[in-house]
Amino acid sequence: MGVEIERRFLVIGDGWRPHVRWQHELQQGYLTSSPGSITLRVRLSHEAGASGATPVEGERAWLTLKAPAPAGEPQSAEGLVRQEFEYPIPPADAGSLLALTERQLRKRRHGLDLAGGDWVVDVFEGANAPLVVAEVELERPDQPVAVPPWCGLELTGRHELSNAALAHEPFASWPAQRREGLLLALGSR
């Protein structure tokens, strides 16, 4: 059984950019998702700058099932620990599955050189811009994390800001007051 242990934060400013090691463009669609239940996602990834319209060399794809944490799993915050089962699939199959999904999003993922876990920053595109989210994958739920100063509001366990929720209800479709409230919580951007 796969387990994902992850904390997420809204990002303030560009202080993370000097830590970038690599970039990928991601397109993902949700075949099924609901808060506190099972999510089935298809993801297509290619190096930043490559065209995603047709399969390209180096393109990779996965089918991922996420579910609530197994019974008895210690958690310090809701959503910190989840079951995750991820399987590579042919990119052409991912393209076919993406064509079946109405709930999709695009983002550019940046891998960072920070210690204390596997850090990435996702810069959302399209209807979810200008959201920028940092994620750190951990080995255990109680692992200490040195949160960088460019990380703002913690999103761990906040379903309305999960990727699945943003694919269903993009940030641009939120009422203006709700969008502005979130951005104000970050300070000036």
Image (cartoon, rainbow, N blue to C red):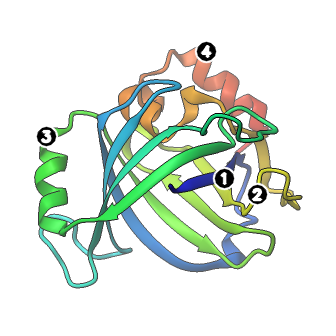
Q: Which mark is residue 100?
A: 3
- Cα–Cα span, label 4 and label 2: 37 Å
71 relative position to 114: left or right: left
Read off the residue under disc 1: 5
Closest to the observer: 63 or 121?
63
Q: Nearer the viewer, mark 4 or mark 2?
A: 2
Which of the two labelled residues, at mark 1 and mark 4, occupies the earlier sequence position?
1
Quadrant position of residue 112: bottom right
In percent of width and height, residue 188 lies at 75, 41
- Cα–Cα span, label 1 and label 4: 32 Å
Residue at position x 58%, y 43% from top?
82
Amino acid carrying label 1: it is Ile
- Please tell me whether residue 10 is drawn above or below residue 89 in the rendered image: above
Read off the residue under disc 2: 140
Marks 1,2: beta carbons within 8 A: yes
In percent of width and height, residue 66 lies at 46, 43
Marks 3,1: beta carbons within 8 A: no
- Cα–Cα span, label 3 and label 1: 29 Å
Residue at position x 66%, y 52% from top?
5
- Tell me how many marks there are: 4
Read off the residue under disc 4: 177
159 relative position to 14: left or right: left
- Cα–Cα span, label 1 and label 2: 7 Å
